[in-house]
Image (cartoon, rainbow, N blue to C red):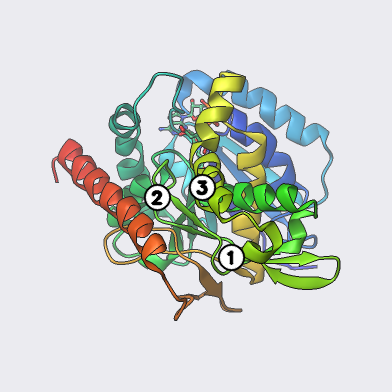
Amino acid sequence: MCSEQLRVLVTGAAGQIAYSLLFSIAKGDVFGKDQPIILLLLDITAMLPVLEGVVMELQDCALPLLRDIIATDMEEVAFKDLDAAILVGSMPRKEGMERKDLLKANVAIFKSQGSALEKFSKKTVKVLVVGNPANTNCLVAAKSAPSIPKANFSCLTRLDHNRARSQVAMRCGVPATHVKNVIIWGNHSSTQYPDVHHCMVNMSGSELTCFDAIKDEAWLKGEFIATVQQRGAAVIKARKLSSAMSAAKAICDHMRDIWTVNYHYWVPDDLIYSFPVQIHKDKSWKIVDGLGINSFSQTKMDATAAELMEERDTALAFLGV
Ligand SMILES: NC(=O)c1ccc[n+]([C@@H]2O[C@H](COP(=O)([O-])OP(=O)(O)OC[C@H]3O[C@@H](n4cnc5c(N)ncnc54)[C@H](O)[C@@H]3O)[C@@H](O)[C@H]2O)c1
Ligand SMILES: O=C(O)CC[C@H](O)C(=O)O
């Protein structure tokens, strides 16, 4: 049994993603089956009565690893001595809303919470930003917490990764675990580039390139990319609500990989850009180097970077910095 309890914050704890996420974290799916945790739950004051119900349900799960639950609307309480922060709390996009509307509504939250990380959390805290626009919110949070290493900040594009992997798996008629090395470059938005040029698929025991397994280059370069890029919008259209179950699963995958060593994606200077990375035992990471990038990929990678630069400039202008 690990002796030290981890302090793990989930913001937006009364919301729909949190409702799918908290049980998985509390039962050990993310930080380990022998790792005791204290859950800190932050939401806005108006949602405290709902949060109280979530706390009751967590208590009623009778989970052995969950040693304490602290529900609050105060950042100074929620961000105290954190080991991990999962920043979900913010407004989701509804049908008809533009990205810019969301940027304006949400970016101030991440400035305030970045400052709270700076003031109250451990310098080793690992921060995962989920609230949209996730990349730019993450950048704003990192900039607002200058004494925490920028490498400790990441945003959620694992959902896009899982979506891409699953699309390929369904097309090939294999389980998603048979599909490896899908890459999501850039922004968690419709300009993201889901890249299968390094993807391998295990078909009946043989490792094939994705292009050989699928044998339909037009689909891979057209409909596949568009489906993954538009998946969030398609879920909103169908459910009238933003994705939640799949987002929670992706949050668990992302944070568990950081905690337990696996591989995933990452960032250049002054942009939070999704990259393939390798994560090491000490939780440090390194961008996977030397992948061949053809002109098709380069054009798509440039387009998503251009969008991120525009978003960054808009966000900083909104904040007056
Ligand atoms: N990156 C991704 O892959 C991904 C996927 C799905 C959703 N999202 C984003 O996650 C966010 C949350 O989605 P949801 O469906 O859970 O929304 P939701 O509306 O159900 O819940 C959001 C919660 O955040 C709370 N909140 C608002 N401001 C807050 C603040 N300052 N501090 C703490 N809590 C605050 C709200 O009161 C609410 O309870 C949205 O921005 C959504 O777009 C991202
Ligand atoms: O607002 C959107 O278009 C996407 C919502 C969410 O980030 C998702 O990917 O499901």
Q: Amino acid at mark 1?
A: Ile
Query: Residue 41, can we see it?
Result: yes
- Looking at the rendered image, the disc whose residue lies closer to the viewer, 1 or 3, is 3
Mark 1 and mark 3: Cα distance apart in space: 26 Å
**Callout 3 environment at 10 Å: few (<14), some (14 to 19), or many (20+)?**
many
- Above or below residue 199? Residue 234 is above
Front-most of residues 228 and 260: 228
Front-most of residues 311 and 280: 311
Q: Residue 222: which disc?
A: none
Q: Determine the residue positioned at 65% across, 54% down.
A: 165
**Quadrant assignment for the N terminus:** bottom right
Residue 190 on image: x %, y % = 42, 41
Closer to the chain start, of discs 1 and 2, is 2
Mark 1 and mark 2: Cα distance apart in space: 20 Å
Residue wearing tag 1? 258
Q: Determine the residue positioned at 82% across, 32% down.
A: 60
- Above or below residue 39? Residue 205 is below
**Callout 2 environment at 10 Å: few (<14), some (14 to 19), or many (20+)?**
many
From the viewer's perspective, is 321 left or right of 106?
A: left
